[in-house]
Each structure stands twice: as C-alpha cells, then as structure tokens.
C-alpha cells in the first residue's frame, strides 16, 4: 500500500501542507529541527491514531494555533490499498474557555472515508512500520516499551485486538482500584470475582495473539538477523506475565497455544485460577501481579539476552531485524507491503547494513526516508528516488539538493 496524499493543518511546525506522493522511495532531507520527523509522525499518527514519540496529543497542535479561540490540528492521509483508496482523518480540537497547551482537554475526531469513527477503528486500515533512532532503546528498556511495540504492530492487523487490549486495561484498572480499597478499608474479597472474570476473559486472547504474532515475526527475524550480522541467529522470546506452567498441573503456554489449537478458553480458566491464587497477595500489594500487563519480549542472540548484555551495535542490529521482520509479517497478513517510514536511521548503520536496508526499501511499494545528509546515499540511489527538501515546516520538491548534481 502507499500514501497518495498528506494534508496537514497546524500539525507540529506545519501551518499548512498539501503533499502528493507516488508509490516509490521518497527522500526528505533538510537540516536539524526543520520538520522531517514531524512529517513521518503525522503519517504514522493518521494510520494508527498514536504518535511514535509522544503520549500527549496536545504537543501535536502548532504552537501558533494556541492564540486562536479554538486551537486545532488536522491530519488527512489518503492511502491506496489493493482494494482501493482509504482516507484517514484525525482532527484534534482543544476545548475550554481559553485553552492552553498545558491544561486544554482535547477532542479527537476521527473520520474514515468521511464517516465519523472511534480512534481504534483506524487500526487495520493502513499498515506502517516506523524505523527511528530511538528504537534501539526498546531492546534494553523497560518491558512496557516492548509490550507497546508488540501491541501497536498487532493492532494494525486487527482492530479487535486493539479493542480487547483497551477492555483489558479498563478491567485491570478497576481490579487494581478495588484491590487498593480492600487493602485500605478491608471488606469482602469476593467482590473481586467480577473483575477477575473480565481480566481473565480479555487477557487470555491478548496473550494468545501476542504469542502467535511473535511466533510468525520470529521466523522472519531470525533469518534477517543472520544476514545482517554475518550468521548469528536472533531468537525472539515471548515471556508471558502469566505462566500457565506455574499454575498447578498446567502445561507451558507454548504447549497450550500450539499443542491444542489456540486454546484460549483454557488459558482464560487458568488465568482465573491464578488470579484467585494470588488474591491475598494482590490485596496486600494493592495491584495485580499476573497477566499480560506483565508480559515481556526478550531479544536473544546466540543464547545471550542482548537487552541485558548486548552492545549498542548488537541492540541496533536486533531491532532493525525485528522491524524488517515486522514489515514482512504485515505484508503477509495484508497481502501487500506496508508503508515504510525511516527517520534518519542510515547514519547509524555501517555500509553492509545500509545496503541491506536500502534493498528492503526498494522492495516495498513505498518508503519514505528522512536524512540530514543525502550524501550518505549512493549517487544512483539518489537519482532513482524522489527528493524533497524541508525547511521550517515548508516542503518543496528539489531535484538538485546540495551535492547532488
Ligand atoms: N507543536 C509544535 N508547534 C510548532 N513547532 C513545533 C511543535 N512541536 C515541535 N515543533 C518544532 O518542530 C521542529 C522539530 O521538527 P522535527 O522533530 O521534525 O525535526 P527534524 O527535521 O526531524 O530534525 P532532526 O534532524 O534534528 O531530528 C523543532 O523546530 C520544534 O521546535
């Protein structure tokens, strides 16, 4: 699939942008802090409803817009899929008397082909994979970041997964609130039955989907990593936050999921039992100890957990292999290649990895890459791609960037 047009109004440092694109590799170049990342952020935001660099949507509204009586930002992205075009639109509107970037509450209005929808419905409409320099932090960072990595990816293939995740998080928050009340005020622990039931019902399919997606991605990642690293295999290990093997008489999650054909009903039952077993300890702690909110994903190279022991270079290669594998997985699910968005990632790679990545870009239907330095790319590559120059939120096609004759 590919992005045919992008329209921005007061999004980050773009007061206004109308951009038409083609299905090929597109290079956006410019100095630091000119709006390269903002552009990729806008595209990924339209496709997923999430920014890949902030959890606060308020930051996305142009600073100048906060002087208006009703500050807003809008992004409209028109993707072309095999089955036709789809127009994704998000408007962020600040509400309140005199809204300020610090205090305003935002209304997020989503339209798909002009029809109002919930933000979660954006998932499954278009597939994007973002490659960013900060990705490397995910390998050795806190588990929550690796869960986010998995979830954003899986949600793109399944809006149902996104809805289940949201329902799980709500149920978990309610259970935790009740646990804290029981801890502070005492009361009948039987009140937890209802929330145990919801937490288990929504949590089991989450674990099932994460395990299945990672199993598929791991196959691609192992092979890509071997090529990138000169022969070392990468193993992606899913560590569930509920280990069925720890629950009396049960088997390991893998056996349960693979051996019996996605036995999520059994997993939900085991989850309920585990919640009951942990109940007293959970009340003492005021939080839920088992469940997919404690899942992790580990990156293992040659038997070594490189999140813990890997060099920066090894972590970078591993996450690059993961992202490329994710792109292949999305391509197999959608039966067309996802849009690849690469934010200044070439500069960090050595010659061989750069070549591998560029080949992957050219295999995709469309890829948009940003760089401060077009000279990092071979002359024939620079000539083949379409190039745009960005300066202070203005984008213009530039057939002749500095150093490219
Ligand atoms: N809400 C906003 N309103 C206006 N400008 C913003 C807003 N948020 C960020 N900016 C500005 O956008 C610019 C950063 O753009 P961006 O992160 O896209 O840079 P970049 O071109 O990718 O640079 P680098 O090469 O340094 O990564 C900065 O000048 C920043 O001040």
Image (cartoon, rainbow, N blue to C red):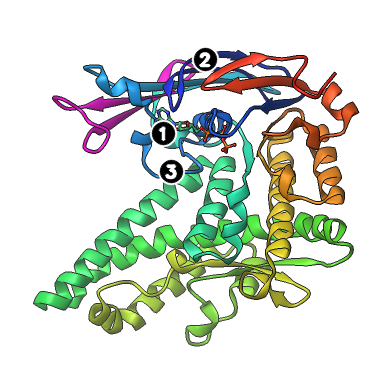
Q: Quadrant of residue 175?
A: bottom left
Residue tagged by mark 3?
Answer: 54
Identity of the residue drawn at 86% across and 43% down: 355
Identity of the residue drawn at 62% across and 45% down: 132
Q: Nearer the viewer, residue 42 or 28?
A: 28
In the rendered view, does 281 fall on the left or right side of 213? left
Residue tagged by mark 1?
Answer: 119
Q: Quadrant of residue 179?
A: bottom left
Determine the CA span between mark 1 and mark 2.
23 Å
Looking at the rendering, in which quadrant would you find the C terminus?
Answer: top right
1 or 2: mark nearer the eye: 2
**Residue 361 horizontal/vertical position (percent):** 78, 36
Looking at the rendering, in which quadrant would you find the N terminus?
Answer: top right
Decide: few, some or many residues near mark 1? Use Cα within 10 Å; few <14, some 14-19, many ≥20: some
Can residue 79 be seen in the rendering of this structure?
no
In the rendered view, does 344 fall on the left or right side of 269? right
The magenta-colored residue range is: 90-115
**Residue 14 horizontal/vertical position (percent):** 47, 21
Identity of the residue drawn at 54% across and 67% down: 296
Identity of the residue drawn at 69% across and 68% down: 311
What kind of element bears circle 1?
A: helix
Residue tagged by mark 2?
Answer: 17
């Amino acid at each position: 699939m590919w992005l045919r047009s992008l329209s921005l109004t007061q999004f980050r440092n773009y007061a206004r942008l109308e951009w038409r694109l083609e299905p090929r590799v597109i290079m956006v170049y410019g100095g630091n802090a000119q709006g390269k990342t903002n552009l990729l952020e806008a595209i990924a935001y339209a496709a997923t409803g999430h920014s890949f660099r902030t959890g606060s949507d308020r930051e996305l509204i142009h600073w100048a817009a906060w002087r208006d009586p009703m500050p807003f930002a809008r992004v409209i992205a028109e993707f072309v899929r095999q089955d036709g075009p789809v127009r994704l639109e998000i408007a962020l509107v600040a509400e309140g008397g005199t809204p300020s970037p610090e205090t305003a509450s935002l209304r997020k209005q989503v339209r798909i082909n002009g029809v109002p929808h919930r933000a979660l419905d954006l998932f499954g409409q278009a597939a994007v994979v973002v490659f960013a320099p900060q990705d490397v932090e995910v390998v050795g960072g806190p588990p929550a970041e690796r869960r986010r990595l998995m979830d954003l990816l899986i949600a793109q293939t399944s809006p149902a997964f996104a809805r289940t995740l949201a329902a799980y998080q709500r149920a978990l928050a309610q259970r935790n609130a009740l646990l804290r009340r029981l801890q502070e005020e005492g009361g009948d622990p039987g009140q937890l039955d209802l929330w145990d039931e919801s937490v288990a019902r929504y949590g089991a399919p989450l674990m099932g989907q994460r395990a299945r997606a990672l199993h598929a991605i791991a196959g691609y990642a192992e092979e890509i990593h071997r090529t990138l690293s000169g022969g070392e295999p990468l193993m992606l290990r899913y560590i569930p936050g509920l280990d069925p093997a720890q629950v009396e008489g049960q088997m390991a999650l893998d056996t349960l999921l693979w051996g019996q054909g996605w036995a999520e009903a059994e997993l939900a039952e085991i989850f309920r039992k585990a919640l009951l077993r942990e109940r007293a300890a959970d009340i003492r702690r005021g939080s839920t100890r088992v469940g997919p909110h404690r899942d992790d994903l580990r990156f293992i190279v040659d038997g070594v957990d490189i999140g813990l022991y890997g060099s920066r270079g090894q972590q970078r290669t591993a996450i690059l292999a993961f992202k490329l594998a994710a792109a292949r997985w999305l391509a197999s699910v959608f039966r067309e290649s996802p849009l690849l968005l690469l934010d200044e990632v070439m500069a960090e790679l050595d010659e061989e990895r750069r070549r591998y990545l560029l080949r992957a870009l050219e295999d995709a239907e469309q890829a948009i890459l940003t760089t401060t330095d077009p000279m990092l790319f071979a002359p024939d590559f620079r000539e083949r791609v379409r190039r745009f120059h960005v300066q202070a939120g203005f984008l213009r096609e530039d057939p002749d960037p500095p150093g490219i004759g």
